[in-house]
Amino acid sequence: MAVVSTSLGGGAVFSHLTHFSGLRKSFLKLDNSNSNSNLTHSLFHAVNSHLRLASSNKGCRGVVTMASSGKFFVGGNWKCNGTRDSISKLVSDLNSATLESDVDVVVAPPFVYIDQVKNSLSDRIEIAAQNCWTGKGGAFTGEISVEQLKDLGCKWVVLGHSERRHIIGEDDKFIGKKAAYALSEGLGVIACIGELLEEREAGKTFDVCFQQLKAFADAVPSWDNVVIAYEPVWAIGTGKVATPEQAQEVHAAVRDWLNKNVSADVASKTRIIYGGSVNGGNCAELAKQEDIDGFLVGGASLKGPEFATIINSVTSKKVAA
Ligand code: PGA
């Protein structure tokens, strides 16, 4: 399904009607079919956003270039890194950092250090797990249950990360099952999607992302507690970050997919964050993109001051009014 104009092979011609609603800018997107129903749908969405945004942004200092109505969201995925000592240093750096207030911040330590982090990290930052079991705990050797994560104070879980998909071999259905269970127990889900380099080169970026998205959509009872992380696999841990335009293009397509396949409300409320070689030097330009609602950060989240810079890149979303 080609939903936006794209250098990846969609070919549809788009026009963007920019308008400002409250203090946020939003776009009306019209596709080349320009049918009445599409137009009506887009208008409905825009009016809806206008009403919602106008009422939710009182007190903002400037125009915020953010399509989602949610708060900017930055997650640090520590992966399988760290020791008690290095983590204690990282936590102390995070505790002393000055963080912008209008950002949700989450870190995902390795399971074995969650308790240490929870007991030493400021409450300003929430804890995520990097994985969870598909259902209630029991006789599942080596697994960690959602109940246990909640017991330790976790609020989130990262699911569908490409390292689990492509190295461990988790498939869409298995990931969907985990997401459904985690949500049903009250954990938030950071739902990762993204294409391999060969899939991008074959013009399949949207197909792959939409298929992974559909698997989440088929499984989850509600999107209220879901943040989508678009992480092109070729950009993860490689130092090869997607350009702001490449990321924006996929984020806009993901939001459009939600609009068409879930609801306009979910499309405008759900945060879509970008991951893949985000660092202190490239975060500001990425953050300026309208549909980038935050970041999922690997390597750079292991350095407290740099992670703080990424969190504070929310300021580059605010443009002088
Ligand atoms: P990276 O990892 O920032 O090291 O590329 C991102 C991720 O895997 O979430």
Image: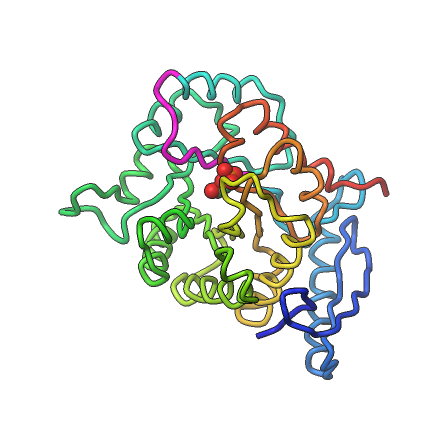
Asked if residue 75 can be seen in this view, the reply is no
Q: Quadrant of the N terminus?
A: bottom right
Residue 75 on the magenta segment: yes
Residue 108, above or below 64:
above
Tell me which segment is drawn in magenta. Answer: 74-85
Q: Residue at x 51, y 53 (%)?
A: 228
Give the image quarter of residue 113.
top left
Left or right: residue 275 versus residue 247 is: left
Q: Position of residue 269 (x, y in %)?
A: 60, 56
Which residue is outermost to the left?
A: 139
Give the image quarter of residue 52.
bottom right
Q: Nearer the viewer, residue 276 or 84?
A: 276
Residue 50 on the magenta segment: no
Q: Nearer the viewer, residue 145 or 166?
A: 166
Q: Residue at x 46, y 67 (%)?
A: 211
Give the image quarter of residue 276.
top right
Left or right: residue 305 versus residue 191 is: right
Asked if residue 146 can be seen in this view, the reply is yes
Which residue is outermost to the right?
A: 321
Q: How many marks?
A: 0
Q: Residue at x 81, y 61 (%)?
A: 18
Q: Position of residue 32 (x, y in %)?
A: 73, 78
Q: Quadrant of the C terminus?
A: top right
